[in-house]
């Protein structure tokens, strides 16, 4: 589903309830009735078409931040942070992971090492160097996979990394084996339940204390409209995740962020990463959950800007 569709649904529902909505997506040009910024298509070797937004900063020497997004969602989750970075002069590269948002699936396995190759393709297509890579959830796993499977690319192009609400070892849906989790997540009844009147409650646990309702609804809408088979195949891969050996060789400044109420990539996963990545630092956000780019975009932006400044 296009990002603007999800945004429009969230706004209309909020308006029907008489709520005011801070529509941060509008500020970047996303939204119903607003022209979407131009994007390019990056084609991978297996035929996937990745939708990429390369948003210019202030001048040719503007610092560059690349933002891979989370499982089951799209680049839109990053928009509150992207808007703040652009207001401060940064060049921002956003893209939809394969099978998500406006990007197609291709024929390669839906595995984290495949996402590393996709990130490499995006970096090459945009020709960015000396960048800060900031990834949320599966986006963070994408960055760590790049460091693991394509360390030469990671070292050549990356000056720092910010890993937001993510993990380097197996995560799941809490329903048993990865295969069972995949079967449950991809079942049509899950999508049907999410699109029901109270379906947003099914993603409420991804947030911490007192989330903005429109953020919960937006997350539900994007997730529900992600291909169920894509969701299911990726959760199987995430249930077998093991990047700990690879990330032990990361040699750029790295920040790991986690919310104390994150129930998906729990705080002990963040602590495990910090214990493994040399010189990394842990930032813990009290009472926040898994959706940190929506829940606390100021804190996430601050850590990215700190990484940019070195």
Image: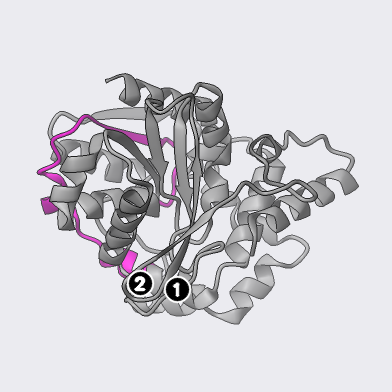
Point out the stretch of residues depicted in magenta: 235-264
Q: In this view, does 293 lie to the left or right of 171?
A: right
Identify the residue at horizontal 87%, vertical 44% (top origin).
Answer: 15
Identify the residue at horizontal 16%, vertical 38% (top origin).
Answer: 277
Q: Does label 2 or label 1 sit earlier along the sequence? A: 1
Mark drawn on residue 110: 2
Mark drawn on residue 297: none
Identify the residue at horizontal 55%, vertical 46% (top origin).
Answer: 77
Q: In this view, does 197 lie to the left or right of 257?
A: right
Figure check: 16 above or below 20: below
Tell me which corner region of the image, top left, top right, bottom left or bottom right, holds residue 239: bottom left
Q: Is residue 290 magenta?
A: no
Q: How crowded is mark 2: few (under 14 residues within 10 Å), some or many (20 or more)?
A: many
Q: Are marks 2 and 1 in contact (CB under 8 Å)?
A: yes
For the question of whether residue 244 can be seen, the reply is no
Query: Residue 109, image x and y in percent?
Result: 32, 76
Q: Is residue 244 magenta?
A: yes
Most foreground residue, 5 or 267: 5
Q: Mark 1 points at which residue?
A: 105
In whole angstroms, how far apart are the C-alphas of marks 2 and 1? 8 Å
Q: Is residue 5 left or right of residue 255?
A: right
């Amino acid at each position: 589903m296009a990002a603007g569709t999800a945004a429009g649904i969230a706004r209309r529902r909020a308006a029907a309830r008489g709520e005011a909505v801070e529509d941060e997506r509008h500020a970047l040009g996303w939204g119903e009735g607003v022209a979407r910024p131009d994007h390019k298509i990056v084609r991978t070797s297996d035929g996937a078409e990745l939708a990429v937004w390369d948003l210019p900063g202030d001048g040719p020497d503007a610092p560059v931040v690349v933002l891979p997004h989370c499982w089951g969602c799209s680049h839109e989750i990053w928009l509150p942070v992207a808007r703040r970075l652009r207001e401060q002069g940064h060049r921002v590269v956003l893209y939809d992971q394969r099978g998500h948002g406006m990007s197609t699936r291709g024929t390669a396995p839906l595995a984290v090492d495949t996402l590393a190759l996709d990130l490499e393709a995006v970096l090459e297509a945009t020709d960015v160097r000396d960048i800060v890579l900031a990834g949320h959830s599966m986006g963070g796993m994408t960055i760590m996979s790049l460091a693991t499977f394509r360390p030469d690319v990671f070292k050549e192009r990356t000056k720092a990394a910010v890993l937001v609400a993510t993990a380097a070892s197996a995560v799941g849906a809490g329903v048993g084996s990865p295969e069972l989790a995949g079967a449950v997540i991809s079942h049509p009844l899950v999508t049907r339940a999410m699109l029901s009147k109270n379906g947003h409650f099914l993603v409420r646990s991804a947030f911490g204390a007192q989330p903005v309702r429109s953020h919960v609804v937006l997350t539900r809408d994007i997730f529900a409209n992600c291909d169920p088979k894509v969701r299911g195949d990726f959760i199987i891969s995430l249930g077998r995740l093991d990047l700990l050996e690879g990330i032990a060789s990361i040699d750029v400044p790295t920040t790991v962020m986690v919310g104390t109420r994150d129930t998906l990539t729990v705080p002990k996963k963040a602590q495990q990463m910090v214990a493994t990545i040399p010189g990394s630092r842990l930032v813990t956000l009290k009472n926040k959950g898994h959706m940190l780019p929506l829940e606390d975009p100021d804190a996430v932006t601050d850590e990215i800007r700190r990484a940019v400044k070195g």
